[in-house]
Amino acid sequence: MDGNSLSSPTPFTPPTTEEDRLAWLRLIRSYRVGPGTFARLIAEHGCASAALDALPTIARASGLSSYTPCPADQALREYHAGLRAGARLLCLGAPDYPQALASISDAPPVLWALGRGNPLAQPCIAVVGARNASSLGQRTARKLAEGLGHSGFTVVSGLARGIDTIAHGAALKTGTIAVMAGGVDHVYPAENAALAAAIADQGLRLSEQPMGLQPQARHFPRRNRIIAGLALATVVVEAAEGSGSLITARDALEQGREVLAVPGHPLDPRAAGCNALIREGARLVRDTGDVLEAVGPAQSNPHTIQPVSPRPGPRSAPHSAAPSAAAPPPPARQRAPDTLTLHRLILDRLGPAPLAEDQLIRDLALPAATIAPALLFLELDGRVQRQPGGLLAKT
């Protein structure tokens, strides 16, 4: 039933009562009802309750002989679970719904928002990239996120490993939004639990999925359109060909937003996607100044978004343990990873572009005495090349 999305956003009269909000939840959680179908049903029937009554008849006409909309008790359980977690339900058309996201054709009718900060009060820039990011890519993402934050922008990303993690951590103090593929209360990957808790304390976590949902592969492309939709521009720091970051960039282009990319070494597969974007017309980014040149200063930007007011309520256990640090803690120095894991960590951070050995040691946060034997093995194995001046490169 969920055919093509509407060509332009449909004006919505957002729900004003708990009964109406539950009807919206029931409608969007009903089988085969996505944002496009939701919009058409509301346009045709006037409200969610009337659309729910009409759904079985519409389904039969579509060839579904037995169709039941989402049960009321299921929507009620989700609604109460969200409130218990301290989350707030944002409905399309309401003042607290992100205006930039509302302008895309397949905007989520409902979003769960979990957070205590006010990052939606500022215009947003998305910073995305590779999960197995190189040391250079991580440092670039950190500088970009910090610079954008100090320039008045909220940094949006997807809470994934690598570039997403770095971008969120660097922008915690200035404003960051994590768009989650699963439920807003389900942190993935688990290693980012501390960072997610810090974001809930200082920023905002958003999801269109039901509370408690564990993300699956099909949820991530849908998540990516929200990342792009929240932002005036999407900056891709590192991306292999066919990566999820390129899906976000494509979504941004389709939504009429700016796409910017950081160039990389032509022999590094993690830079192949960024280099291809630049070849196809994306703006090349070297630093924060290049981003500001593309979108203009935050103070004069007309796309400022209405803030989300924090909702008082109990907070789940992970949030109460939120650290005040701006990034997740580094690996403990006293416990070295096993040999194979250490080799993978080293190779993940190296690329064809040379990297100083002391920088690699700092990035890994491990003793030099632990890293040196692993480097020697990788050199002898032909996977790492040592160059003059203490530089290392992956062969």
Image (spheres, rainbow, N blue to C red):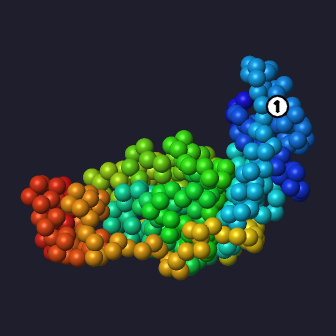
Quadrant in the rendering for residue 149: bottom right
Image height of 40 relative to 373, above or below: above
Residue 234 appears in the picture as rendered: no
Image quadrant in which you'd find residue 391: bottom left
| Residue occupying image coordinates x 70% and y 39% | 34
Q: How many marks?
A: 1
Observer-nearest residue: 61 or 78? 78
Identify which residue is drawn at 41% across, 53% down: 239
Across and down, in percent, residue 222 comes to: 59, 46
Camera-side residue: 8 or 138?
138
Where residue 93 appears, x then y in whole percent?
A: 81, 55
- Front residue of 338 and 205: 338
Q: Which residue is mark 1?
A: 55
Nearest the eye: 201 or 176: 201
Residue situated furthest left in the rendering? 380
Q: Is residue 124 left or right of residue 195?
A: right
Residue sitting at x 76%, y 19% = 65
Residue 40, how many percent across, how many down? 81, 37
Q: Amino acid at mark 1?
A: Leu
The answer to whether 327 is drawn above or below residue 186 in the figure is below
**The N terminus lies in quadrant:** top right
Question: Is residue 332 among the parts visible in the rendering?
Answer: yes
Q: Residue at x 43, y 43 (%)?
A: 242
Estimate how packed mark 1 is, as few (under 14), some (14 to 19) or many (20 or more) residues with alpha carbons within 10 Å: some
Left or right: where 376 falls relative to 79: left
Q: Is residue 261 left or right of residue 85?
A: left
> The C terminus lies in which quarter of the figure?
bottom left
Secondary structure at badge 1 equals helix
